[in-house]
Image (cartoon, rainbow, N blue to C red):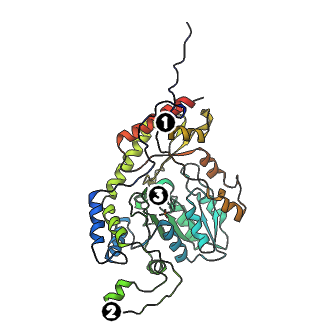
Amino acid sequence: MTLIAPSKEALALHGGAPVRAEFLPYGRQSIDDGDIAAVVETLRSDWLTTGPKIGEFEEAFAAWVGARYAVSFSSGTAALHGAAFAAGIGPCDEAITSPLTFAATANCVLYQGGKPVFADVCEDTLNIDPERVSACITPRTKALLPVDYAGHPADLDELCIIADRHGLTIIEDACHALGGEHRGRRVGSISHMTVFSFHPVKHLTTGEGGMVATDNPSFADTLRKFRNHGISSEARERQAHGQWHYEMVLLGFNYRLTDIACALGLRQLSKLESNLARRRELAKKYNDGLRGLPEIVLPVVRESVLPAWHLYPVRLNVAALSAGRAEIFQALRAENIGVNVHYIPVHLHPYYRDRFGYKPGDYPAAESAYERLISLPMFHGMTDRDVDDVIRALEKVMDFYRN
Ligand SMILES: Cc1ncc(COP(=O)(O)O)c(C=O)c1O
């Protein structure tokens, strides 16, 4: 008797029926009626910008992360720029960061005329490797810029030791990690300055927006001036004191977050705990549902941390598959699963290659991870059904391409 192998299910990429009818994005905001009411209330108030909501949001945010101060910015990128300025990064200075991040992390050093220096990542967490950081330190190093990739806090203990030893400032890019914890301490309460983003795919949104958390009053003061043209007082203070006089004391920008955005941020902050709990639940569902697929390498969580799960990035075990990442990505998209890739290593972008001469092979751990990475949909508004659809699509696609 001849055994006939059961035929594989036709992929949507090849004209088969997709796993779900509607496209599931990799991330999206959740806005409820309370959020809308808070924004409308501010729209009816006297202050659309530079008003009372800014201080309220900053205080509530600082208290939540466990920092003395929080200074809001118009985006995470602007907040990174402010932190690079406050850290005193200037021409000829170097700051060490991860190649596996969004370009904004490294760009903020360039805005200040400094040079971003990359240290390769650890193979497990894809966060910057402290040993490789140590090897990059020179007399010009001014700051370390670790990234909490996907929401998994970087190796902050080791990085703090290195920073103390060499007198460096740590600017932690926690744009993925609001609500993450490292040895029981919340991200935002550990580094000299911690930067957050409030883009709609993040844990809390203000449309566009960002924040720097710090315990250092001098950093906080500089950050406040920097986001307001370098001016030493704010319009509301001047109005309250009946004054017209102000002084520009440093070269800053208009990086202010509006009161409209802060009203939304305050409301969103009140839901942060439940958003985080849902993301952790979703990560567990993925872990449980995908553990049996040998073609998928699940994200690693070190014992010392509680991740915030901004992303759920898996790595493909390409040796077990008859197609590469690009085809598998397309196949999942055709199934209406909005997968993404985080990130093209920064040093491989044309700007960085042309300006600094970087080339493939310079940071092998980041590059090898990049070749295999796929971010699965992850946002707190996802339903159990959505997760089941993603798992089902992965099973279908892996089954098709299994060697
Ligand atoms: C790691 C990282 N750093 C910085 C940023 C920049 O934040 P924003 O988009 O708020 O400017 C992002 C944005 O996604 C990010 O993921």
Tag 1 residue: 394
Residue 303 lies, in percent from the top left, at 46, 50
The amino acid marked with disc number 2 is Gly
Considering the image in quadrants, where does the N terminus appear?
top right
Q: Is mark 3 within 8 Å of ligand 1?
A: yes
Residue drawn at (31%, 58%) of the image = 271
Which residue has dot 2 on it? 242
Spatial CA distance of label 1 from label 3 is: 24 Å
Splitting the image into 4 quarters, where does residue 132 fall? Answer: bottom right
Label 3: how many residues lie within 10 Å, few (<14), some (14-19) or many (20+)?
A: many
The mark that comes first in sequence, 2 or 3, is 3
Q: Nearer the viewer, residue 35 or 112?
A: 35
**Mark 1–mark 2 CB contact (< 8 Å):** no
Residue at figure coordinates x 55%, y 55% from the top left:
127
Q: Which residue is mark 3?
A: 176
> Residue 22 at what x, y percent from top left?
41, 41
Farthest residue, direction right: 357
Q: Position of residue 296 (x, y in %)?
A: 53, 38
> Could you say whether the residue bearing mark 3 is in a helix, strand or loop?
loop
Q: Amino acid at mark 1?
A: Leu
**Which-is-in-front pick, marks 2 and 3?**
2
